[in-house]
Image (cartoon, rainbow, N blue to C red):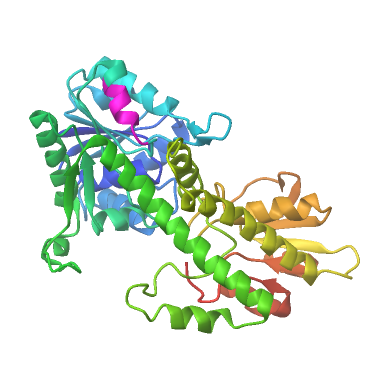
Amino acid sequence: MKIAVAGTGYVGLSVALLLSQHNEVHALDIVPEKVELLNNAKSPIVDAEITDFLQENASGERPLDFHATLDPEQAYTGAEYAVIATPTNYDPKKNYFDTSSVEAAIKAVRTYAPDAWIVIKSTIPVGYTQQLHERLHDDRILFSPEFLREGHALYDNLHPSRIVAGAPQDDPQAVEAARTFVGLLAHGAAPEETDRTNPDGTKGIPQLVVGLTEAEAIKLFANTYLALRVAYFNELDTYAESRGLDTKSIISGVCLDPRIRNDYNNPSFGYGGYCLPKDTKQLLANYDKVPQNLIEAIVAANRTRKDFIADEIMERVEGVENPVIGIYRLTMKSGSDNFRQSAIQGVMKRLKAKGLTVVVYEPTLDAPDFFGSKVTHDLAAFKAESSVIVANRWNADLADAGEKVFTRDLFRRD
């Protein structure tokens, strides 16, 4: 089966490689440098499994029917499915995701593949796909949410927690197309996943085909719950720090409850990255005229946490003449090169607003400055220059920096 994938970010590239194990896949992007890297078996993003797949394909160890291209005609012509995984950044002025890239991709697909099933994997507002059906008079558009971690996107596709697709439940043809797509993703998963036992006692990968709008809601509510956990344990940490208590022991005791569990509980500077900030804000916007208190509180809690962290850092340099705040890495997570909307940037902005000098150590950033703050790749000089080193996530590189390091990464893991 020929499948086209629009976008080669974390979502698009991981899905494309997964599907190319058993299908002819053409991955389309608008950035020539990314396409050139992919066609030379190099990953444009940091992801160990993606790198391995590309290298093993080049060596013949893992043959993939994978093609990266800049040409929409080549990508879409003859495709039975076209997966759209283009970016949908949150627009605070419109209070809505910017879905222009999704609609541009749909238009291109329909130019060359008028009968292909389009599967949107970009994160979109609740109700958006149904609106497309009505506005474009196109009933061959489905939605399938992704549940991936940055730096582990292909791994999470190979070992999915669940596979979900949305289709109009009163359209048997669309439901069958959604089931087929779910089956394609399941077929690409790691072989051992077919024999796994789930917490509810069922076997294999949980597969759901639900309504279009329900599938969109699953995505936003899942990410908002994750943001809730981040905010909850960050507020626990804020309380403990303010009262001189041992956060780590409190979290360890709380999470021994099997209903709470020891997951997603490591304090940080706030939730960030590409998904959680925009998804929580979009879900809050979708609550227009619907009663709510909790969703708004989650969004507000993230701002409050960054305020608290900035205040804590300022206390560390109180009395220091001409202090320099060193920011160790802009990335949101260990093992990732992505620092879009990372929480540490929010802390940086607050510190700079107070007039403090900030220097950034970020080896993946090839620029002399970042929003006016000096960028360095010299770690030793960075440590020497910094009065305090701010790290959202601990790294062994900081072991010799002693009391200079400020982090809330208590468990030394993401």
Judged left or right of residue 89, residue 165 is: left
Q: Position of residue 203 (x, y in %)?
A: 11, 64
Image coords of residue 302 (percent x, y): 57, 55
Whether residue 132 is in magenta: the answer is yes
Residue 378 visible to the viewer? no
Residue 395: say if magenta: no
Q: Nearer the viewer, residue 352 or 357?
A: 352
Relative to residue 315, is residue 95 depicted above or below? above
Question: At 39% across and 22% down in the image, what residue appears?
Answer: 104
The image quarter in which residue 177 lies: top left
Where does residue 19 sit, x and y in percent of width and height?
21, 44
Q: Residue sitting at 45 percent across and 83 percent down?
A: 253
Q: Residue 233, can we see it?
A: yes
Q: Is residue 319 above or below residue 252?
A: above
Point 21% across, 17% down: residue? 114
Quarter of the image that includes the N terminus: top left
Q: Could you tell me what secondary structure mostly forms the magenta stretch?
A: helix
Side (left or right) of 134 relative to 271:
left
Q: How many marks?
A: 0
Quarter-of-image position of residue 405: bottom right
In-front residue for pair 112/259? 259
Residue span colored magenta: 126-133
Q: Nearer the viewer, residue 353 or 65?
A: 353
Give how far across and how far down residue 20 sits, in percent.
21, 43
Instruction: Say above or below: 74 vs 67.
Output: above
Residue at position x 65%, y 75% in the image: 241
